Image (spheres, rainbow, N blue to C red):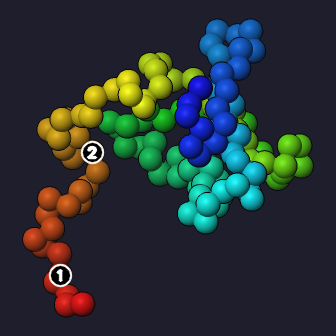
Amino acid sequence: MSDGQENNTYRVDLGGDRPVILRIAFEPGRQARSERELMRNEHASVPFLAPIAPIAPMIPHTLAADFTHEIIGRDYLFQTMLDGGCGPGRHRPLPPASVDGVLPGDGRDRQSYPRRPG
C-alpha cells in the first residue's frame, strides 16, 4: 500500500464490514539505527496522542500486535483502516492556520525560551 519506507503495509479483507491493515516492520538487520523498534515506539505513543482531539480521528486503532518475533521474526500489528487515501503525493500540506493549537509549544513562542550560549 505504501512506498515501504518504514514497514511493509498490506490491506487485508477478512470478510467483515471493513478491511484491516497489516503492518510488518523490516527485519532488525534492515532497520537503520534511528528506526530500531520504531513500530513499538509508535504503538506505545498512541495512548498519549489519542486525547488530542484534532488528530484523534487520524489515529488507527490497534486490533492486535506481536513484538515477540516468534511467528514471523519481525514486529507486526493489525490496525483499523482509516478513510481516505495514502498520504504521499495525495494530500496538500495543511495551511498553518488549520493546525494552530494542535501541538502546544510549536515554536511560535520561542522568544520565551531561555538563551544559552554554545
- What residue lies at 47% left-to-right and 26% top-to-bottom? 86
Secondary element at image label 2: loop
What is the three-letter code of the residue carrying label 1? Pro
Q: Is 84 on the left or on the right of 67, as rendered? A: left
Image quadrant where residue 12 sits:
top right
Q: Work out whether mark 1 precedes mark 2 in sequence or the reverse, and give the earlier one.
A: 2
Label disc, if present, on residue 48 of the rendered structure: none
Q: Nearer the viewer, residue 18 or 48?
A: 18
What is the three-letter code of the residue carrying label 2? Val
Q: Quadrant of the C terminus?
A: bottom left
- What residue lies at 62% left-to-right and 13% top-to-bottom? 18
**Residue 63: in sight, yes or no?**
no
**Residue 32: in sight, yes or no?**
yes
Q: Position of residue 39 (x, y in %)?
A: 62, 49
Question: Eyeballing the image, is 77 above or below 118?
Answer: above
Q: Position of residue 27 (x, y in %)?
A: 75, 51
Q: Residues within 10 Å of mark 2 (few under 14, many from 20)?
A: few
Q: Residues within 10 Å of mark 1 (few under 14, many from 20)?
A: few
Image quadrant where residue 79 sits:
top right
What residue is pinned by disc 1?
114
Q: Is 100 on the left or on the right of 3, as rendered? A: left
Q: Nearer the viewer, residue 6 or 39?
A: 6
Kindly give the residue lying farthest to the right in the view shown: 70
Label disc, if present, on residue 102 of the rendered structure: 2
Q: Position of residue 95 (x, y in %)?
A: 18, 35
Secondary element at image label 1: loop
